[in-house]
Amino acid sequence: MRLHNRIASLNQRSDRDYILQRVDYYNKLSAGTVLPSSSPILKNHKMGRQKVYFFDTYQFTRWFSDDFHWGFCPGDVTFVPEY
């Protein structure tokens, strides 16, 4: 419910257009992108040796159901993955 409230509050923000531009810039996947069945499930995302990656991704993945699959590309991603 927190995510829903956070998204709903976007319309009241004076920087709404800027935020949407940033989202469009970073999120190049189209709606309805189907991930391979082999893609990991969020609840299996555990902290390993690369703690920076874990914390960088956790700040975003924590908003979603633990049962969701996700397409994770480690490192500095400069391409749009094809699924």
Image: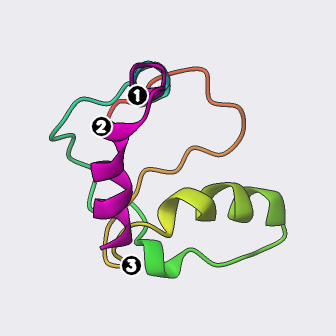
Find disc 3 in the rendering and name its residue: 66
Q: Is residue 45 above or below residue 19?
A: below
* Residue in the picture at 61% in, 57% down: 57
Say what amino acid the circle numbered 1 marks: Arg
* Sequence-first tag of 2 and 1: 2
Is the residue marked by circle 2 packed among few (<14), some (14-19), or many (20+) residues within 10 Å? few
In the rendered image, the quadrant that contains the N terminus is: bottom left
Are the residues at dot 3 and dot 1 in contact (C-beta closer than 8 Å)?
A: no
Give percent across and percent down for residue 20.
39, 26
Give percent across and percent down for residue 36.
28, 53
User: Which numbered tag is attached to residue 11?
Assistant: 2
Between 21 and 66, the residue placed more toward the observer is 21
Question: Which image quarter: residue 66?
Answer: bottom left
Between 6 and 80, the residue placed more toward the observer is 6
Q: Is residue 58 left or right of residue 19?
A: right
What's the magenta region?
1-19
* Residue in the picture at 50% in, 23% down: 22
Taking the magenta stretch, the answer to whether it contains residue 61 is no
Is the residue marked by circle 3 packed among few (<14), some (14-19), or many (20+) residues within 10 Å? few
In the rendered image, the quadrant that contains the C terminus is: top left
Mark 2 residue element: helix
> Mark 3 or 1, which is nearer the eye?
1
The answer, for residue 50, to whether it is visible in the render is no
* Sequence-first tag of 3 and 1: 1
Find disc 1 in the rendering and name its residue: 16
Mark 3 residue element: loop
* Sequence-first tag of 3 and 2: 2
Marks 3 and 2, Cα distance to the nearest angstrom? Answer: 27 Å
Marks 3 and 1, Cα distance to the nearest angstrom? Answer: 28 Å
Taking the magenta stretch, the answer to whether it contains residue 13 is yes
